[in-house]
Image: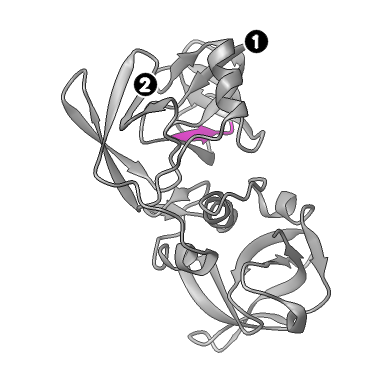
Amino acid sequence: MEYGICNLAVIPLRAEPNERSEQVSQVLFGEAFEITEWAEYWVKIITDIDNYVGWISRLQFAPLGHIAHKNLKSHQPPLTYRAVTQAWKIADNSVIYLPAGSSLAFLEGTTCKIGGDRFEIIGEIGENENIATTAKSFLNAPYLWGGRTHFGIDCSGFTQVVFKLNKIKIKRDASQQAEEGVKVNSLKDARLGDLAFFNNAEGRITHVGILLNGEHIIHASGKVKIDLIDDDGIYSVGLKRHTHKLHSIKRFF
């Protein structure tokens, strides 16, 4: 088996080995993966964080040895908690701007050693506070299909990254996340941090958000925002109508 690790701030994970192909997710700095297939300009990977499959450019990662990969999987590295953390790439005296949730792999003191490069972390990396504070830090982040950062994020990328920053590992897509956790019977039993899932007319789960309480939800739809929620689903004050039909609620901690 062959492995790799992201040595850039964030790279697109695509459905097909083509720059015009749909971005299905993103790989953040320090996240590792298994390489399952090589093409001329692309590699097919399975991410360690959520077993997500897709293609990345051969120019956008560093190789990772088997032993290093094993060590990385067995020891959760520190994360960055600020929306942006600066990392000085010593080799070319450049600065990389790391998104929240980046993994500071192989950190020694304040230096990450990834591939043949060293990255000096500038300033404090911050710390997780709680689900609500972490989630609200993403307010007004624009919706981006496949996104996982403050500069563009989709609904399940939002829930996954917020949970990652609070040391809770969940899968990538809303439909996958809905299969995890413990069922909460109703909104009146909901707690801060429970995930609410929403289905379309065909019954397929297409949306997810984080409950702040039994009346408010924070979610990514157009942008990350706080809306009202009731037994029928999400109610948009601006649109004066329900926009998402409530399917289920799950608890993860």
Magenta stretch, overall SS? strand
In which quadrant of the rendered image does the N terminus lie?
top right
Amino acid type, mark 2: Lys
SS for dot 2: strand
162 w.r.t. 111: above or below: below
Judged left or right of residue 65, residue 194 is: right
x and y percentages locating residue 81 in the rendered image: 40, 51
Residue at horizontal 21 percent and vertical 22 percent from the top: 90
Residue 179 lies, with reference to residue 92, above or below; the image says: below
* Residue 7 found in image quarter: top left
Residue lying furthest left: 93
Q: Which residue is mark 1?
A: 1
Give how far across and how far down residue 100 sits, in percent.
41, 48
Measuring 31% from the left and 49% from the top, which residue is drawn there?
Answer: 84
> Residue at horizontal 79%, vertical 53%?
179
Please state the extent of the stretch shown in magenta in the rendering: 11-15
Q: Secondary structure at mark 1?
A: loop
Q: Where residue 23 sits: x, y (%)?
A: 51, 40
Q: Quadrant of the C terminus?
A: bottom right
- In the image: residue 245, left or right of residue 164: right
Q: Earlier in the sequence, mark 2 or mark 1?
A: 1
Q: Which residue is mark 2?
A: 113
Q: Is residue 223 visible?
A: no
Q: Is residue 115 above or below residue 134?
A: above
Residue shown at 64%/38% (left/top)? 50
Return the mark for residue 173. none
Question: Splitting the image into 4 quarters, where does residue 44 fall?
Answer: top right
Crowding at dot 2, Cα within 10 Å, few <14 / some 14-19 / many 20+, comes out as: some
